[in-house]
Amino acid sequence: MVHAPAPLMPRRVLGARRLAFAAILLGLLGIAMLLSLGLGSRVTGWADLGAALSGEVETMGEATVASRVPRTALAALAGAALGLAGAVMQGVTRNPLADPGILGVNAGAALAVVTGLATLGLASAQAYIWLAILGATGAAIAVYAIASVGGGGATPLKLALAGAALTAALASLTTAIVLPRGDIAGLVQSWLVGGVGGATWDRIVPVLPFLGTGALLSLATARKLNMLALGDETASALGESLWRVRILAAAGAVTLCGAATAACGPIAFVGLVVPHLCRLLLGVDYRWILPASAVSGAVLLVLADVAGRLLARPAELDVGIVTAFLGAPVFIWIVRARRVSAL
Amino acid sequence: MTDIALKLDRLSVGYGDFPVLDGLDLSLPRGRITAIVGANACGKSTLLRAMSRLLKPRSGRVLLDGVEIHAMAPRKLARRIGLLPQSPVAPEGITVFDLVSRGRHPHQGMFGRWRREDDAAVAEALRLTGTGPLAERLVEDLSGGQRQRVWIAMALAQQTDILLLDEPTTFLDINHQIEVLDLLTDLNRERGTTIVMVLHDLNLAARYADLLVAMAHGRIHAAGLPRTVLVERMLVEVFGLDARIVADPVTAKPMMVPVGRHGADPARAAIHPMENAS
C-alpha cells in the first residue's frame, strides 16, 4: 500500500557490524583459551600444547597443559554464566549497576553452600548446586525487598546499596561459619575468593545441566527485556505480562549464578563489566546483548585467570581477586558517568 | 454515536483502601476523539490506566466489543488498544527506527521474526508522523516535540484501532502541542482510529475533541459535546474556577477565559498601556 523509502539499508549495516563483532568475539574466546592452556606458573611450549590436546600425555609439561584444560573450560563456563546473568539482571531491574556479585546473589549462594558443608555434610555435588541456587534466590528476593522499602521503589542506587550491605552481611556470616571449623576452612578458603584453579571434570560435569537450563531461560527473555526497557507501562501496553518477564528472568539469572558459584565460588564484577561493553558496541537490543555478554564473560574470566597465574608467579592469584581489580574502576566509572538512571 | 469502542461498566479502581474511581459508567464512541479533563488527582490518569489494563478494577468491568479486557490475552489486547504513557522511557542509545519497530511486538510470533508487513507498518508510522528523516537519529538527541511524534509513531506501528494517550502535550511548547493534536486528528480522520486522551488544556480539549468528559472526585461529572460540557457551571463545580465562555474565533467551539481576582479590576482595565507610555 504505502511505499515509503524503506529504511532497511542502515539496519543491514548494523547487522553486518553485529556479525563482525560476533566473529571477533568468538575469535577472542579461542585465543584466550589457547593462552589459558599455554601460559601459567610453569613454563610450557607449543609442543606440550599439541600433545596434551591430542591426549598423549607423557612429559611433565604435557601433563601441566592437560591439567589446564578443565580449568580453562570452567573459567569459560562460569564467565559466560556470570556475563549472561549480569545482562539479564541489568535488563530486568533496568539497573546499570546490577551484577550477581554486587547485588549479593553470589554471596547468598556461597553462604548456603558453606552452611550445607558445615551442618548437613551433604555428599553429592547436585545437592550443593541446589543449595547454591536456593541461597541465590533468597538473596535476590531479600535485596529486592530491602531496596523497595520507602518511596520511589527499587531505584538503581538503592538496589546497589542494599546489595552491598547484604553482600557484607552474608560474607560475614559465611566467615563466622567457616572460621571455627578447621576441617572445612582449608577446603573453602580459595573457593570463597572465587577461583577456578584445581578444577576437575568431576566438578564441572554436574553443573552443566544447570548452566544449560539457566542459559535457555535467560536467552528466552531477550525480546521481553527489549519491551521492559521501554518502561513498565509501555511494555504492558505492548502485550507483555510484567510479572511473567520478571519471574522468567529471575529464574534464569539465579540458576546461572547459583551453578557458577557452586562450581567456583562467588565471583563479582564480570556481570557488571561485560553487558556495558556489549551495549556500547552492539546497541540496545537484548537479542544481541545477551549472547554477546555470555561470550564476552567467558573471554574476560579466562583472561583474568591467565593474568592471575602470571602476575603472582610462581604462586597464583585467584580469579575473583583479578575481576575485582578490573571491575571496581568500571563500577566507579558507571556511577560517575551518570549512566545510573539511563537503562 | 451508537457504535461503542470501549465501555466502562460500574468501574471502581483504587490503591489500597482509597477508591480513585468510584462506580464509573462511560461509553466511548468508535472512530471519534474523546478528551478527558478534570482537576489534578480526579482520577483521569487512573481511568486511562484501567482502560489499558495496567490497573485491575476492584469491581466493575472494562468492555472492548462486549468482552472484558481483563479476560483477554495480553498480546491480543495489545493488537487492539495502544497506550502512550505520560512520561515514556527509552533506553539510552536507541534509534528512532528501533523504537518505532518495537511497536510491532504484539504482532510478532514466538520467535519474533521480522516480516514484510512489519516493515510496511513501521514505514507508514514514520510517514504519518513525519519522523522518517529522523529514523537513524538517537531518541535522546531529539527535541521534545520530535520525541513525542516518535512515541506516537511507535504506538501507530502497533496498528491498534484504539489509541489512549496520557497528556500527550505536556512539556511541549504551544506550537508542538498544536502539531501533536493536529497529527492525532489526521489519524482519526484518515484511519478512523478511536482516540482517547487526557488533556490539561481545556480550550485545546474543547477544540479537538468530539466528546468531552469532565471528571471530578473519581466520577464522571459531565460527558457530551464540548459545547454542552465546557460551560461556566462545570468550571465552578469541577475546577472551582470563575470563567467566561466565549466562541473560539477560529472554530466557533467554546473557549473559556478565566476571570481571576484581578481580571475585572476597573482601575487596571482603564489604563491603556499605550496611553500610559505617552
Image (cartoon, coloured by chain):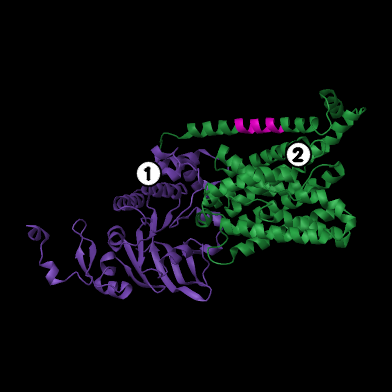
Chain colours: A green, B purple
Q: SS class of the residue under badge 1? A: helix
* Cα gap from disc 1 to disc 2, whole angstroms: 58 Å
* Residue A332 position within the rendered picture, expressed as x and y whole percent measured from the top left: 59, 48
Q: Residues within 10 Å of mark 2 (few under 14, many from 20)?
A: many
Tell whether B3 sits left or right of A45.
Answer: left
- Can you see residue A241? no
* Residue A161 position within the rendered picture, expressed as x and y whole percent measured from the top left: 62, 58
Q: SS class of the residue under badge 2? A: helix
* Residue B118 position within the rendered picture, expressed as x and y whole percent measured from the top left: 50, 41
Chain of residue at mark 2: A
Q: Which residues are magenta?
A: A20-29
Chain of residue at mark 1: B
Query: In this picture, is A84 found above or below B258?
Result: above
Q: Residues within 10 Å of mark 1 (few under 14, many from 20)?
A: some
Q: Residue furthest top?
A: A47
The residue at 66%/57% (across/down) is A164
| Residue type (three-letter) at the residue carrying disc 2 | Gly
| Residue type (three-letter) at the residue carrying disc 1 | Leu
Q: Which residue is mark 1?
A: B128
Query: In this picture, is A151 found above or below A42?
Result: below
Q: In which quadrant of the rendered view does residue B72 lie?
A: bottom right
- The main secondary structure of the magenta stretch is helix
For residue A169, which numbered disc appears in the image? none
Query: Front-most of A53 and B192?
Result: A53
Query: Front-most of A70 and B68?
Result: A70
Whether discs 1 and 2 lie on one chain: the answer is no
Q: Nearer the viewer, mark 1 or mark 2?
A: 2
Tell whether A161 sits left or right of A152.
Answer: right
Q: Does the segment drawn in magenta span residue A188?
A: no
Q: Which residue is mark 2?
A: A308
